[in-house]
Image (cartoon, rainbow, N blue to C red):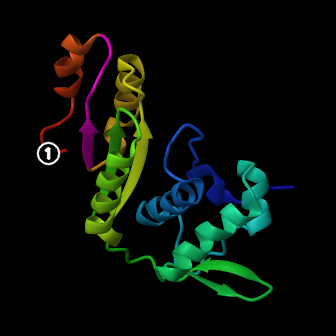
């Protein structure tokens, strides 16, 4: 069976702390912004997405419903989902790196996400105070984001943190 062409542009990172439905929704938004998907294009079925990414059907459906709630997708009962809006106002794509998750940091994340609202997509990673993981996450993702937010804390090699952080362009 031939796979839907949009799958080349969708991505879910199993290691991200960002919920999978939100990652899926953000990758669909990115495909629209990058003009890989056009208005009125039909999206793969929920079952196809579920199978392709090895996620639950509920997760795929939640992503589609989230995008439908934003007015980006439309649906026809029994037929599926399609792109109904390509003029998106999302201004920021943010990489958020926390050293660990705690109640205090959950409050920070929630207020950060609430304040930005629909103007931003946030990809959230936890690096567990591991300098090597922090460096890897940053170097692999630095060009994908308009802004990078870091809560730094390391158990070791902290003396090299400034070298890594200084690789981030100042406008980010």
Residue extending furthest toward the left:
170
Picture coordinates of residue 28 (x, y %)?
53, 62
What is the crowding at mark 1: few (fewer than 14 residues within 10 Å), some, or many (at least 20)? few
Q: Is residue 3 visible?
A: no
User: In the image, residue 78 lies at what x, y percent?
Assistant: 80, 86
Please identify the quarter of the rendering in which residue 167 is found: top left
Q: Residue furthest front?
A: 103
Image quarter hosting the N terminus: bottom right
**Is 57 on the left or on the right of 65, as rendered?**
right
- Front-lying residue, 158 or 64: 158
SS for callout 1: loop
Image-quadrant location for residue 131:
top left
Q: What's drawn in magenta, residue-wise?
A: 147-156
In depth, the one of 128 and 25 nearer the eye is: 128
Name the side, left or right, on which 55 lies relative to 13: right
Compared to residue 140, the image places residue 161 above or below, namely above
Q: Residue at x 39, y 17 (%)?
A: 132
x then y, percent, for residue 66:
54, 73
Residue at image position (67%, 62%) is 59
| Image: 1 above or below 79 | above
Report if residue 140 lies within the magenta region: no
Q: Is residue 169 visible?
A: yes
Q: Position of residue 102 (x, y in %)?
A: 39, 42
Q: Residue at x 76, y 63 (%)?
A: 57
Q: From the image, which quarter does the C terminus lie in?
A: top left
- Per the image, the residue denoted by label 1 is 171
User: Which residue: 58% across, 53% down?
Assistant: 20
Quarter where residue 128 is shown: top left
Does residue 156 appear left or right of residue 101 in this picture? left
Task: Single out the residue that lies furthest toward the bottom.
Answer: 77
- Front-most of residues 103 and 148: 103
Say whether residue 43 is left or right of residue 22: right
């Amino acid at each position: 069976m031939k796979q839907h062409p949009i799958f080349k542009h969708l991505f879910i990172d199993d290691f991200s702390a960002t919920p999978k439905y939100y990652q899926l929704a953000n990758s669909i938004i990115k495909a629209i912004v990058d003009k890989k998907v056009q208005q009125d294009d039909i999206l793969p079925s929920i079952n196809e997405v579920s199978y392709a990414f090895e996620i639950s059907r509920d997760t795929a459906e939640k992503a589609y419903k989230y995008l439908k709630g934003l007015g980006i997708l439309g649906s026809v009962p029994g037929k599926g989902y399609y792109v109904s809006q390509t003029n998106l106002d999302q201004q920021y794509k943010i990489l958020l790196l926390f050293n660990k998750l705690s109640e205090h940091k959950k409050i920070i994340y929630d207020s950060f996400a609430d304040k930005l609202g629909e103007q931003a997509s946030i990809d959230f990673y936890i690096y567990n105070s591991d300098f090597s993981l922090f460096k890897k996450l940053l170097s692999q993702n630095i060009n994908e984001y308009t802004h990078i937010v870091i809560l730094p804390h390391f158990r070791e090699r902290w003396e090299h943190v400034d070298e890594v952080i200084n690789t981030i362009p100042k406008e980010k």
